[in-house]
Amino acid sequence: MGRPPRQLPDTCAHSESLPATDDVLEAVTHIMAPLVRLLLSCGVDYVRFAAVLKQTFIEQAQVELQRTRSRETDSALSLLSGVHRKDVRYWRENGMGERIARKVSLSSQVFSHWTQNPVYRDRFKKPKPLPRIGGEHSFESLVRQITQDVHPYTVLSEMIRLGLVSVKKRQGLDWVFPSPRGFVPPPGSVELLELFAGNLADHVASAVNNIVESPSRLEQGVFAADLTAESTQKLALLAQKLWVQCRAEMIGECSRLYEQDKGLPQATQRMRFGAYFWDEFIGDDTPTGCSTGSPVDQDPLP
């Protein structure tokens, strides 16, 4: 008596809820345009990028097979990803390159602690200037709360290089002033690339989740066109003001919950909350008016 045929995964209902393949490809191509500009400006051509992208397709095909509870055979990975079986087999046996785990930079950790710890903030809840060395309310003590492995002078030198702080004399003593822009590393820095990768990847992951799985993630935006350059500048300043307010509240609650949860065996989750603003010259095919929404919320503003 032979074995019964394997049960096929039930994907009909899921597939019917997904957008058309051509529509998805068009949307992703639109998203890729600025990323391709970054690649080209940094000397990465199509051939080199395609070679790296092959690994990503295999990895995400594996994730999709796991999500649908399908068998992760070489044939299944090859069929789903479009990558040749010999490449899939090579990846299984040797790996196609290790993914580098991105960690939050020390400069970012120090600046974040500066903005959320009441000891280092003024009455307006903004990070205040600190004496470079001294007691518990100095820049030195701030760094020591984050790390004991790196000297505060080394951290200060790096943050000065990045333009995140400046040092001024007050009554013969060195005082460290935070950048009024917040943690915004300069163009071309590794720190800015870390923020770029983390912020954009999580933003896209939230949007994709709303399309592919359950519409339960916050992913919203406000769009307006037919504005003057002066108006967009005013909106940019408003966006910065609103971000400073919500950032301070979110950092405070994150810190409180982190202290509450650290050490617990079930503390295995991470999160990211962000905001962005972009303005540019519009073409003839740009929608007009003002609206708000996400892939699951497209109600126009009143």
Image: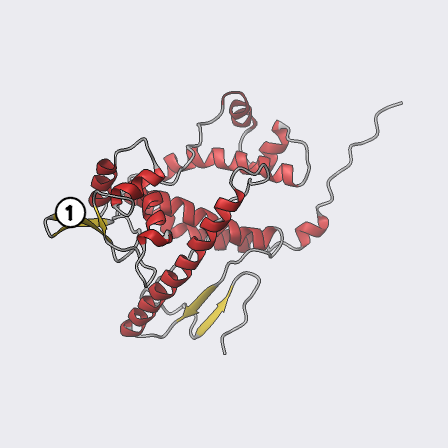
Name the residue located 33 percent from the left edge and 52 percent from the top edge. 119
User: In the rendered view, does 212 fall on the left or right side of 223?
Assistant: right
Residue 191, horizontal then vertical, whole percent: 31, 43
Residue 85, compared with residue 205, is above or below; it is: above
User: In the rendered view, does 132 fall on the left or right side of 72?
Assistant: left
10 Å crowding of disc 1: few (<14), some (14-19), many (20+): some
Residue 68, horizontal then vertical, whole percent: 67, 41
Name the residue located 43 percent from the left edge and 75 percent from the top edge. 289
Query: Which of these two is toward me, 33 or 125?
Result: 125
Residue 249, horizontal then vertical, whole percent: 43, 59
Q: Given the current orientation, which residue lies at the most extreme front position?
A: 135
Name the residue located 32 percent from the left edge and 46 percent from the top edge. 38
Q: Which quadrant does the N terminus fall into?
A: top right
Query: Which of these two is toward me, 30 or 222?
Result: 222
- Amino acid tagged 1: Asp
Name the residue located 49 percent from the left edge and 46 percent from the top edge. 258
Query: Which of these two is toward me, 224 or 217?
Result: 217
The reply to whether residue 81 is visible in this rendering is yes
Residue 227, horizontal then vertical, whole percent: 34, 74
